[in-house]
Structures are given as C-alpha cells and as structure tokens.
Image (spheres, rainbow, N blue to C red):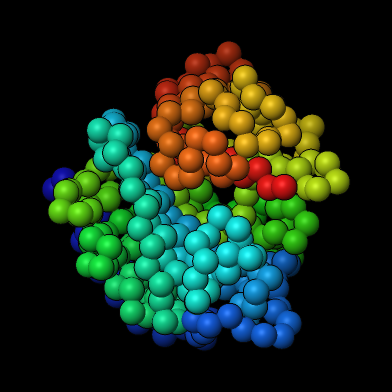
C-alpha cells in the first residue's frame, strides 16, 4: 500500500471516530462572519484541554485568530498553505479588505515554481473541539478541516470552484505539540510576544497533498505542519530525524522574544524554550531588525544543553506568499545543519518574515 493510499484510509476512518467521539470534553463555537462590536475575550493561559480551540471570542475589529496548515514537497518546489482566518485587515494588515472576518486563504506552488493565491470569504464558521483537536467548517466556501482528539492526524478539504481549487491535505504528526515556552499542558503562557498567542498542534508531520488548481494537478508528499499563531521570523523544518520550529521577534520597544523547539524521532529533546540566550535566528546579508529587505538565508541556533548546539542554515528559495519588496514574505527552501559534531541530513523548510511598522 503506497503512502498516499494509507493516508487517505486513516483520514477517513479516524476522523469519523474523532467527530463521533462520546466525550464530555467537547466545545462548539460559532463565529459570525460580520465583524462584532464590543470587547473580545482572549485566552493567553492554557487549559488542560483545547490546545487547538478558538482563543478569541467574539471577533471584533482589533483581534485575530486562525488555523494554519502547510506542506512542502521533499523533492521539488510544490507546496500548499491553507489558513482559515478570523480577522479583519485592520487587526492583521496582510489580509485583503473584506466585509467578513471569516475567510480562507490558499497559497500554492507547482513543481516548476509557479505560484498562486486564492481567497474565499465565508458567511460564518463553526469550530468544534474534542479534547485538544478541532474540526472546522467555513460556511459557503467548501472548505473545512478535521482533526483527531489527540491532534495526531488532520485532514483539510477544499472544494472552491469559484477560485478553481479542489483537493485535500493529509497530516500525520511525528512530533509532540507544544506552547511557546513549554509542553502542551495546563498553565502555560501562550504569548509568543506580548498580546500575540501561539499553540503548535503539529510541529512536524508526514504530509500528503492532492489538489487540482485551475485545472492543473499538484500532488506530493513531504513535511507538513499545523498551528495557531502570529509570527515575525518564524519557520519549521525537518532535518533527518529532527523536527525544528523557530521564532524570533522584536516588539516596538526593541525587546526580543524567542521560541525554539527540537524533537528527535517524535520525542522532544528539551521541550520548547523561550530563553533568548538559547535561541537565535538572524537573517544573512540583510538587516536586523527586519525592515522588509530580503535576506538570502537565515542562521538558526538552538542550544540543547547536553545534546549540544543545533546550528542550521535555511536558504531563501521560492517566494510562495507576499512580494520580494513587501514587508511580509513566505518562502520554501532547503535547510542544512549540524548538532555538535554531527552533520544532519538536509531537508526542506517553510518560513516567514513579518516586518511591521
């Protein structure tokens, strides 16, 4: 049985079980399409369950929340990124102006490097949480996702003929979830920097993408990822048996905030850390702090204590979102690295730079 067939089988079987789970730990959330007035309630301290659940209710004009999924081919320039937003363009200025806060953004790249962005607005959204995993439907878009209660598996389905995109993304997690500064447990501070939360449900995954975009197929296997977050210098990668997630940001006062996560063969090495002495991400041949200029690589260092220092270089390859001179850019590219004296197997990465004024 090939990998794609196996992924489709477990997606069909296990998601049915997740959605039918007879559990008291079920939460139902309906998110209105129009922007809401009044104060929003924002969760920044984790509960024992609900890692992937909505963290902002209701969605007014000053807050944002989203569910982000991606996958990149291990052998060519194919990739897909799907984000289910609940935000206005005022709260998150990289969005297109829309009459609703519920929108689905789809970014794709073909093996030949051709890229595209597709946007579908939803009338509203429904997000159900079972233990930690979620399933969501953005009404009227043909777009949805579903995850198992333990977040081990997710499937994203898109059927949006108005923009010419149809297909599915399957993720099978191969690294444990975490918050910015620690494991997925109650009482964790979810702020990656002041007033911006982050919950990483799937730091690394075996992914299978099977889409048709404007009549052309995109089908590949490779690393995948899923989180709920906002970020400035952020990325994730696979280096042989190692799963890596990094984040480095500055607030308007110049204070630096970091998060570094490394797992090996599905086990966290030291847990996530937010200690600036242990995590450093810097652009190569570009300015720091970021001002919108484009680096040719990023240099990543994560100190793992007795395990040694993981040092990696991720090359800026294909721009798959944003524009080369725009203050937001997402790339896919190759990554190489070492851990102590060990040279790690090269891999691929998805990574972003925000430069907010």
Residue 302 occupies which quadrant of the picture?
top right
Tell me what residue is drawn at x 49 percent, y 81 percent: 33
Tell me what residue is drawn at x 25 percent, y 33 percent: 112
121 sits to left or right of 356: left
123 sits to left or right of 108: right
Q: Nearer the viewer, residue 332 or 62?
A: 62
Q: Position of residue 269 (x, y in %)?
A: 60, 38
- Pick out the residue farthest to the top: 341
How many numbered circles does the render carry?
0
Q: Position of residue 279 (x, y in %)?
A: 71, 34
In this rendering, the answer to whether 336 lies above or below 356 is above
Looking at the image, can residue 58 be seen?
Answer: yes
Residue 69 occupies which quadrant of the picture?
bottom left
In this rendering, the answer to whether 259 lies above or below 19 is above
Residue 14 occupies which quadrant of the picture?
bottom left
Looking at the image, can residue 174 be seen?
Answer: no
Q: Nearer the viewer, residue 280 or 58?
A: 58
Tell me what residue is drawn at x 45 percent, y 79 percent: 125
- Pick out the residue farthest to the right: 253
């Amino acid at each position: 049985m090939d990998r794609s067939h196996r992924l489709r089988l477990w997606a069909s079987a296990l998601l049915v079980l997740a959605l039918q789970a007879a559990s008291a730990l079920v939460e139902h959330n309906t998110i209105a399409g129009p922007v809401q007035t009044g104060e929003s309630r924002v969760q920044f301290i984790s509960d024992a369950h609900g890692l992937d659940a909505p963290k902002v209710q209701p969605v007014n004009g000053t807050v944002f929340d989203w569910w982000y999924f991606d996958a990149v081919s291990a052998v060519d320039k194919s990739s897909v990124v799907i984000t289910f937003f609940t935000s206005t363009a005022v709260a998150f200025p990289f969005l297109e102006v829309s009459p609703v806060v519920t929108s689905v953004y789809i970014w794709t790249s073909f093996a030949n490097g051709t890229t595209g962005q597709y946007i579908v607005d939803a009338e509203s959204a429904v997000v159900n949480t079972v233990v930690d995993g979620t399933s969501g439907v953005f009404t009227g878009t043909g777009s949805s996702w579903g995850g198992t209660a333990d977040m081990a598996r997710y499937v994203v389905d898109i059927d949006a003929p108005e923009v010419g995109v149809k297909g599915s993304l399957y993720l099978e997690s191969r690294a444990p979830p975490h918050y910015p500064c620690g494991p997925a447990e109650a009482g964790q501070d979810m702020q990656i920097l002041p007033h911006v939360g982050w919950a990483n449900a799937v730091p690394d995954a075996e992914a299978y993408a099977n889409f048709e975009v404007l009549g052309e197929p995109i089908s590949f296997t490779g690393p995948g990822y899923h989180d709920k977050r906002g970020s400035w210098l952020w990325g994730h990668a696979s280096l042989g048996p190692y799963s890596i997630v990094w984040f480095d940001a500055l607030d308007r006062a110049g204070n630096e905030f970091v998060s570094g996560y490394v797992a090996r063969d599905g086990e966290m090495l030291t847990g996530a850390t937010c200690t600036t002495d242990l995590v450093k991400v810097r652009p190569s041949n570009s300015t720091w702090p970021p001002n919108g200029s484009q680096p040719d690589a990023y240099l990543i260092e994560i100190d793992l204590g007795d395990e040694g220092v993981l040092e990696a270089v991720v090359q800026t390859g294909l721009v798959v979102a944003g524009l080369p001179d725009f203050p937001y850019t997402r790339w896919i590219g190759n990554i190489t690295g070492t851990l102590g004296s060990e040279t790690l197997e090269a891999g691929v990465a998805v990574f972003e730079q925000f430069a907010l004024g």
